[in-house]
Image (cartoon, rainbow, N blue to C red):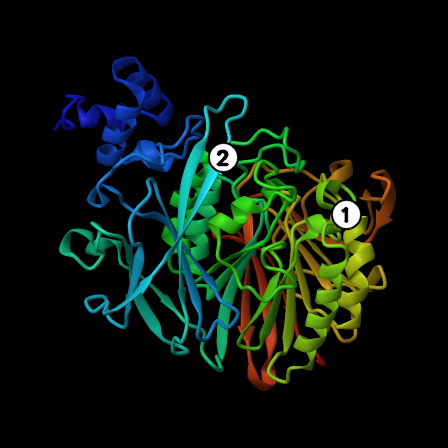
Amino acid sequence: METPDFGIPEQLVRRMSMAEQHEYLRAALPRRRALLTVGATAGGLLTGCSSSGAATADRSPAPNSTARVPGSAVTPFGRHLAFGADPKTQMRVSWQVPFTVKKPYIRVGLKPDDLSRRIGAEVRDLSTPGAEGIRGPYQQYYVHAALDGLRPDTTYYYGVGHDGFDPASPPHRSTIGSFRTAPASPERFVFTAFGDQGVNPAALANDKVLLRQKPAFHLHAGDICYANSSGHGEKKDLFLPGLWDSFLKQTEFVAKSVPWMVTTGNHDMEAVYSADGYGGQLARFSLPDNGFDPRKAPGVYSFVYGNVGVVALDANDVSYEIPANLGYTDGKQTVWLDRRLGELRAMKSVDFIVVFFHHCAYSTSRHASDGGVRDAWLPLFTRHEVDLVVNGHNHVYERTDAIKGGEVGRKVPVGGSTDPTRDGIVYVTAGGGGKDLYGFTGGVKDSYEGHLRDRESVETFRWTESQDKKDETVEWSRVRYTGFSFLSVQVETGANARLKVSALAESGERVDHFEIRRGA
């Protein structure tokens, strides 16, 4: 089979990596014409992945936004879901297209063969200027549809399209996806969490095991794709926008049905777009807009699912270690946090409060603990009796005992239980989402389910406001695992309400488990 007009064998193009495609086409054809033709037919060049599915970094610009490409030749990709402020009645569906399209929309229905409801969608175009190693500008087009007024506890089917591409037509029916809204009063459900994912085989393996847990939603604690590999939040950071295309394709098979609730890590500060670096996140994701300022801090929001109140925070605002955005909200995020935690704790329907953000409050791995997080937020977590805190940043799994007043309030061994009203809060570092792994400070060995080691103290440090490392000898580091992993939390409601927390390796092996019960 050959592509029209130019006689380039499509099978040859499909076997090439993206870099090889670029070099071949630049040598053989006028550059712009080649991008349009091979992109429309082979697909891999314009979406950031080779046809074999291998994720590759694209240092060349996306096609010119003025190019005329028929809608029938433009295939949506990278679908990802997120709740609105009310998971029972609101869902946000997002996707990407490699070219501008006319009249994008989503079709929704209660049966896959009856997508009768059609809702217009919004295109957010993102232009990245050229930088060292990147010929710019790099154009990306993200599409978002807001679904409101949905029925609780209901499975919906959906397809995304635009003029020339109808997901309900026979050629495209394989693109139809589904999701389920939150029930009004679930008996039990599961959610998952990790941070520090990236584009690589380990991230893909984690996603596959994660999907088998059938989570109601997933919490992503930041450092999502690593298009900014430096992570300093500065304009001079190396930045490859094409990695986002690869990431969204990699994650689509799970995020198209599981709401992917993200917040911002240090590698998500992409200063090429704005002073705070969140222009890219605003373009790519539609998250709940109930934070203190969703346009300024898109990674700050909350939602309630069943008996669990979830709060997402932007720790870049308080980090002493990486101060690019330190204080950028002028304390408004912390004021909002105090108010929101109080509101959640006052709700009779909410048994548990889970908070997730990127930088670690307590960890003994490479980045250790961030004193800024401790200073700003730990008093609020204590005051409002937060039940579980999930972080990323350190590329390991580490879990503390219950911590109260900075000390061990109760030892929580593997298989143990804790009561936050009495013992304090358990902090989990779930940074094994897929990016290269770290070790622990001082060469401390792993200690996890089936491989436990006796050790009561660990030499580590915390970051101070002057960006110095303050040495600490701590006793709260209870479980450590230097492998790819994620958190799986089974929630039970009613009189026996509890959080049954497990850490699973990318193989599916359980490396930790414990239980949280209030007032036990």
Label 1: few (<14), some (14–19) or many (≥20) C-alpha neighbours in 10 Å: many
Q: Residue furthest left?
A: 1
Q: Which mark is on residue 369?
A: 1
Q: Residue furthest front?
A: 66
> What residue does disc 2 label?
128
- Where disc 1 sits, the SS reads strand
- Quarter holding the N terminus? top left
On screen, residue 123 versus residue 400, left or right, reads left
Q: Which mark is on residue 424?
A: none
Would you place residue 134 above or below residue 204 in this image? above
Give the quadrant of residue 515. bottom right
Q: Position of residue 480 (x, y in %)?
A: 67, 48
Of the image marks 1 and 2, the number of the one nearer the N terminus = 2
* Residue type at the position of mark 2: Thr
Q: Nearer the viewer, mark 1 or mark 2?
A: 2
- Where disc 2 sits, the SS reads strand
Q: Position of residue 189 (x, y in %)?
A: 49, 72
Rendered residue at 63%/85% (across/down): 348
Q: Residue furthest top?
A: 27
Q: CA distance from mark 1 to mark 2?
A: 33 Å
